[in-house]
Image: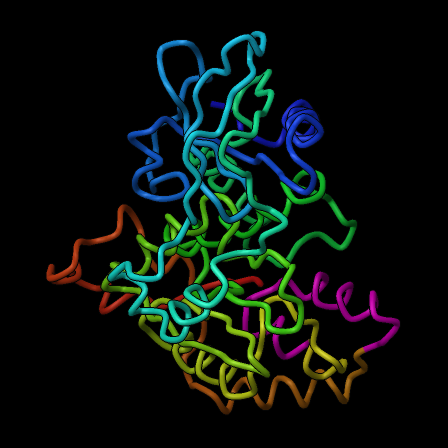
Amino acid sequence: MAPPLAPGDAAWARRAAAAGPAGARVLAWVPPARGAGGVGGGAAAAPAPPGPAGAAVAVVGAWRAELEEAAGGGEGVWRAVRVDPAVVPGEAWLRRFPGWADRLAAAPAPGALRLGEGEELELGGPPVATLEGLGAAVGGRPGVWTAGGGAKGEPLAEGELGDALRSAGELLALQRGLRGITMTQLHVGWDAAELPSGLRPFAPALLRELAGDPDIEVVMSELEGSLTAILCCRSEPFLSYARHLAGFGCQAALEAGSPFYRVLVGRLLGYAPENIAAHVAAAGWEAGPAVLREVEAEVRALSPARPRLPWRRGAPRRPGRRPAPGRGGGGGGGFGRK
């Protein structure tokens, strides 16, 4: 299957958004068997387009909506018959992300992005994104999700769809060993209406899988009520990098406030030097030789190990199994982003 990055996908997202209630964004959908496991359910199989054979599960912001064909609504018109949060506070895997369940219990997701039961949507085209298609894109162009984005600003897709693909794509890259560390925003304390990357399509299912991965460590970072999960392979230097980022409250959705910290965060997450420089320049700054030397000294002091990629080859091992010879607890390399 071709990666879900064609212009037609973004156009379908715009049509679906226009047909839905104000503020809703239908970004993906999966058959009921997949949707029961979360957004995308972690499944690799691509779903077929919705049709008269049965309901579908649409991902609308941070919510799952079971759909049925709307009687008298015309071809491709579906009605939401059940709406649930993409992540339920009582789920056991959330224990790997301390503090998230409490925030979800207080505010499950930005309400403006919720599709109400009984409301209708027109799903007149193919799925805007599938986990299988996203996986093919990550495998075909890993640098998009590991090197910190292009200095030329190459977009993955338009608007919120691009954000959704970025978040899930980076988690997939970590899961496949293509990067050793990444960050995902779980709660945005400074803007309750902002949809955090951890609740965008496919991200909850991937976070659920990574929570059960014995080679992945989760380090939580808090700042003024906001919460970010820093996920990394369980080897150096990535464990030290993750703990250092959490030590100064680094947040995935918050830009670093100085050239030094922009370079440091980019360096620890494995960005390409040219993309780090572009990120600094975007704020009107320049990271001169003195700043670069200071950052490199701090990075070297964190761990004597050096990143190597890929840190994993093949599928993740199941909990309780010994790692393959030579892999240790999670390999030893990594690029990262976000």
Give whichever of 326, 30 is nearer the camera.
Answer: 30
Number of numbered callouts drawn: 0
The secondary structure that most of the magenta stretch takes on is helix
Residue at 41% x, 9% y: name it: 52
Give whichever of 115, 233 is nearer the camera.
Answer: 115
Looking at the image, is 22 positioned above or below residue 309?
Answer: above
Give whichever of 180, 296 is nearer the camera.
Answer: 180
Q: Does the rendering let one see residue 122?
A: yes
Tell me where residue 277 appears, x and y as whole percent.
76, 68
Residue at 44% x, 26% y: name it: 67
Q: Quadrant of residue 288?
A: bottom right
Q: Quadrant of residue 290?
A: bottom right
Tell me where residue 172 appears, x and y as whole percent.
43, 49
In the rendered structure, the answer to whether residue 87 lies left or right of residue 257 reads left
Give the extent of the magenta segment: 263-286
Name the quadrant of the C terminus: bottom right
Residue at 50% x, 71% y: name it: 228
Tell me where residue 147 appears, x and y as whole percent.
60, 57
Task: Judge whether residue 267 is colored magenta.
Answer: yes
Looking at the image, is 116 positioned above or below residue 247?
Answer: above
Q: Does the rendering let one see residue 183?
A: no
Give whichever of 256, 98 is nearer the camera.
Answer: 98
Task: Judge whether residue 206 is colored magenta.
Answer: no
In the rendered structure, the answer to whether residue 224 lies left or right of residue 7 reads left
